[in-house]
Image (cartoon, helix red, strand yellow):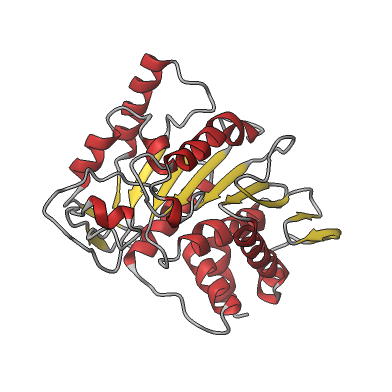
Amino acid sequence: MYSATKKLVQTEFLAFAMKAFAVLNKGRRLDNDKYLKLLAEVLSEVAAGRTKRLAVSMPPRHGKTFMASICLPAWILAHKSSAKIIVLSYGQDLADKIAYAIRAILRSDWFREAFDTRLAKDRAKVMDFVTTDGGGVRSLSIEGGVTGLGADFIIIDDPVEIKDCDNSKRLQRVNDLFDDEIQTRLDNPKKGGIVVVAHRLSEDDLPGHVLGRVEGAQAAIDRAAGQTYELADGEIWTRCALTRSLSATLNGCATRSSRGSRLSSSRTRAAATACASKQNISPHSCRSYRSVTCPSSSALIQDKKQVPPIASV
């Protein structure tokens, strides 16, 4: 590996993801879309400990699992090999695929050349592997049971299948699991990170559940529409206004015409603090969730009804 490339993958999360994508996909290139740059920025903040709660909403096939559930754990372990990470998804099959990809990155030649993190030889199962420094990944279905587990980071990837978009009992079940079991698994709730990454299915799904507990979050999201954002490399990205139909969303179709947004962290924190003071929310709560809406390739607008945009980071 050239020294310049090595330096990039060591210090830039997006470069790390691009290298991982090429290796895992036999030389294919990860698209250099601006929404991926924004996503890489906010995920980097989680890894660095500056963002403790993050919800990311993206349609299917836009790279959310690869970036947030595969590359983020690998990136965290690359820089902190003692970190403990739990990854949860709607089914064990997807959880296994995610864990297999993370492990493949950590075993790859380029990773071993760039980082000192090594997997322990005596514990390297797909769904449960550890590093020589005691960190590692436990990858389970959302119903797999997390009792007895502890983590520094918890990543929840598509906890509900699209076919269950109108299944109110299933949506509530996942929200209850999150409230009562999953978020309590952080070893240090004040310092640990939780990421929810999912396609939106309903206003009552998990992203809506965690964001809905922050008073003022909806208004902040609405104000963000049409604003211009500067990415880390100086590029300018203007987010279009959101318009979508409820029927298109619930049918699991492409849901947004926007190109994404990032909320003002100060506004979000202020609203969250006010909400926490009024409702006496516990340290495990979602009061500090940031919210970003990433794009769809197209929007299916079946009527002129505008659904309140519930974003996720």
Residue drawn at the location 20% of the way across and 42% of the way down: 222
Total numbered circles? 0
Q: Residue 63, percent across and down?
A: 45, 65
Whether residue 51 is visible, yes or no, is no
Q: Residue 32, percent across and down?
A: 38, 73
Give the camera-side residue of 68 and 146: 146
Whether residue 206 is visible, yes or no, is yes
Residue drawn at the location 25% of the way across and 46% of the way down: 309
Q: Is residue 185 left or right of residue 209?
A: right
Give the camera-side residue of 203 and 278: 203
Residue drawn at the location 33% of the way across and 41% of the way down: 203
Q: Which of the 4 image quadrants contains residue 41? A: bottom left
Q: Indicate the quadrant containing the N terminus: top left, top right, bottom left or bottom right.
A: bottom right
Residue drawn at the location 58% of the way across and 61% of the way down: 70
Q: Is residue 148 left or right of residue 185?
A: right
Q: Residue 110, percent across and down?
A: 66, 75
Give the camera-side residue of 25 and 148: 148
Q: Is residue 218 left or right of residue 209?
A: left
Q: Residue 65, percent across and down?
A: 51, 61
Which residue is the extreme one toward the bottom?
Answer: 27
Give the camera-side residue of 280 and 235: 280
Which residue is the extreme one toward the right?
Answer: 122
